[in-house]
Image (cartoon, coloured by chain):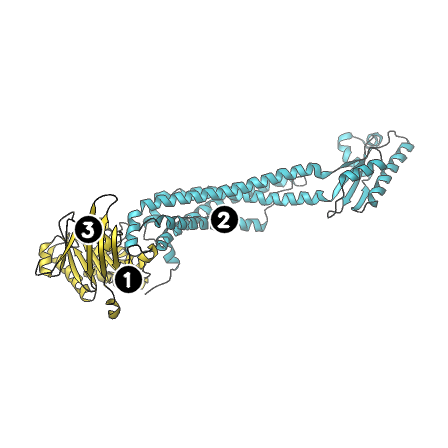
Chain colours: A cyan, B yellow
Amino acid sequence: MMAGIGLKGLFRSDLPVARDSSGGFLPWLIALMVFFAAMATTGSVGLTDMIARWNRDVAGTLTVQIPPVIGTTAKAKEETAARVERAVRLLQSLPNVVSASEIPADKLAALLEPWLGSRELIDELPTPRLIDVTLNPQARPSLEELQTRLKDAVEGATIDDHQVWMSKLISLAEGLQKLAWGVIALVSFTTTTTVIYATRTALAVHRPHIEVLHFVGATDSYIARQFASRGLALGLLGGLGGLLGAVPTLWAIVRLSEGLQGGLIPAITIAPLTWALLGSFPVIAGLIAMITAHITVRRQLSGML
Amino acid sequence: MQQEQFEYDTVRFKSVGLRYGNGPEILQDISLTLTPGSFHFLTGPSGAGKTSLLSLLYLARRPSRGSVELFGQDVTSAPRHRLPAIRRRLGVVFQDFRLLDHLSALDNVALPLRVAGASEAEIQRHVPELLSWVGLASHMQAKPSVLSGGQKQRVAIARAVITRPDLLVADEPTGNVDDRTAIRLMHLFREMNRLGTTIVIATHNEQLVRQMRHPRLHLEGGRLSILQPEEG
C-alpha cells in the first residue's frame, strides 16, 4: 500500500506551483546572487593567498642601510667598507639573526643603472650600502633595540623594515577580504529573504488548494515538500545561470592579471579547489532555497487548522 | 477490524457550541452520537447551521465550546499533527466540490491515495475503475474547467470514497445531478454504508430522505433534533 517517497514523488506536485508567477523572478535573482558570491569568494580566496605570500616574504627579513663616508678617495671607500663590516659582524652576533650579508655593490649598481645612468657615475655618488638580514621568524628581535645597537656601532645606520609599509598593504587586503565575506553574507541573506517572501506569496495564492490537501489528510510536511522541491529546482536553475556568468568573467580576470606577473601583486590564479567550490554554488543555492521554502511553509501552515 | 470499529463511536458531540468571531452561536448545545455503520441525513432550512455542523465533522473548525470526538479521539483541542491521520479516515463531498482546477479528474480522485502514500500501480488500478463506475470513463483526463456541474460532483464524490473512509460527510451530494445519477450515487453510499462506513448527508431533498428511510439530524435555529424515519 505505502510506497516510499522516490525522486519522482519528490518533484511531483499536487499544487500548481510550477505555473506560479510569484516565483518567476527567483531564478534571475538567485543567478545574480550566485554571480556576486562567486566573485566575492574568488576574491577572498585570492586575497588569502596573497596575504600569506606577502607575510611569508616579509616576516623574516629586513634591510639595514649604512651611510657611506663622503668622498671618492680610497680612504673613504675603506672607511665605508669598515662601517659595513662592523654592522654585519654585529648583526651576525645577534641570537635571532639567521644571516646578514652585504648586498654586493655590483648588484646595487645594476638596480640603479636604469635611473642614474652610467656605472662610473653611480660609483662616484654617495649611495648607501645595504645589508640584507634574515631573521628567525619564530623569535623576531626587538627592532628598537636593534636600531639602537646598530647606531652605537655605526653612526647613521638605519633599518628599513619591509613590514612597516607591507603591513599597511596587508591591512588593506584583509579589509577587502572582510568586505568580500560581507558580500557573501549579504547575498545569502538576500536570497533567503527573497525565497521567504516568494514562498509566502505562493502560499497565499494557493491557500484554497492547500485547504483541500489538508482535508484529504495531507500533512504539513507533504505540502511543504512540494514548495521545497520547487525551491530546489529554481535555486539550481538560478545557480547554474549565475555560475555560467561567473566562469567566463573570472577567466577573463585571470587572463588580464597575467600581465602583472613578477610585480608586487602576483598574477591571479584560481586553484582547482576554488573551481570545485564555485561548482558547488548552484547546489548550495538550491539547498538554501529548498530549506528556506520548507521552513517558511511549515511555519505558515502551523497557523492553519 | 470489525471488533475495533465497535470499541468507540464514530462521532460524539457533547454540548457543542460554535460561533464565528464575536457573533451569535450558530450551533447551540449540540449533543450527538453516531455509531459505526450508521446512516443519517442532515436536514434543516438554509442558514440553520448544516454546513457549520459538517465543518466540525471534517475538522475544518474546532468548536467554541463543548467537545468533539471522532473515532474515539478527542479532537476539540488535539494538536495539529494528529489531525491528518484522522482526516484520512474521512471522506468529504463539498457543496462547491473543491476540485483542484489544474489536475485532471483522475488526479483529483487520486489525491487522497497519493497523500496516504499509495503506489502509482494501486492508483492506476482503482481510480479509473471508480471513475468508470460514476460514469466518467471518457473524462478521466479532463480538467474540472471543462466538466459540467454534475460531472464535477461525481468527481468530488469519487474523491471522497476512493479511500473507503470510515466516515463519509457529504453536503448536497446529489444537488447537481439528474435523478438517475442521483439514485446511482445513493446506491453507492448505501453500499459503502453496508460495508461499514458511517454516513452523514446534508440535503434539502425531502423525497430522497423519505425514500431512503434513514434517521435524520434536523437542525433549526442552531439546535439539533434527531428524527427517526417513521417520524419524518
Task: Identify the subunit bearing mark 1.
Answer: B
Task: Identify the subunit bearing mark 3.
Answer: B
Crowding near the residue tagged with mark 1, few <14, some 14–19, many ≥20 C-alpha atoms within 10 Å: few
Q: Position of residue A268 (x, y in %)?
A: 61, 43
Element class at badge 3: strand
Q: Position of residue A8 (x, y in %)?
A: 37, 57
Q: Say left or right for A146 vs B4.
A: right
Element class at badge 1: helix
Q: Which residue was labeled with disc 2? A: A281
Q: Position of residue B225 (x, y in %)?
A: 14, 55
Inspect the image, locate mark 3, and give the three-letter code of the amino acid beneath it: Gln
- A257 vs A214, nearest the viewer: A214
Q: Position of residue B7 (x, y in %)?
A: 25, 67
Q: Which residue was labeled with disc 1? A: B124
Inspect the image, locate mark 1, and give the three-letter code of the amino acid beneath it: Gln
Element class at badge 2: helix
Label number found at residue B28? 3
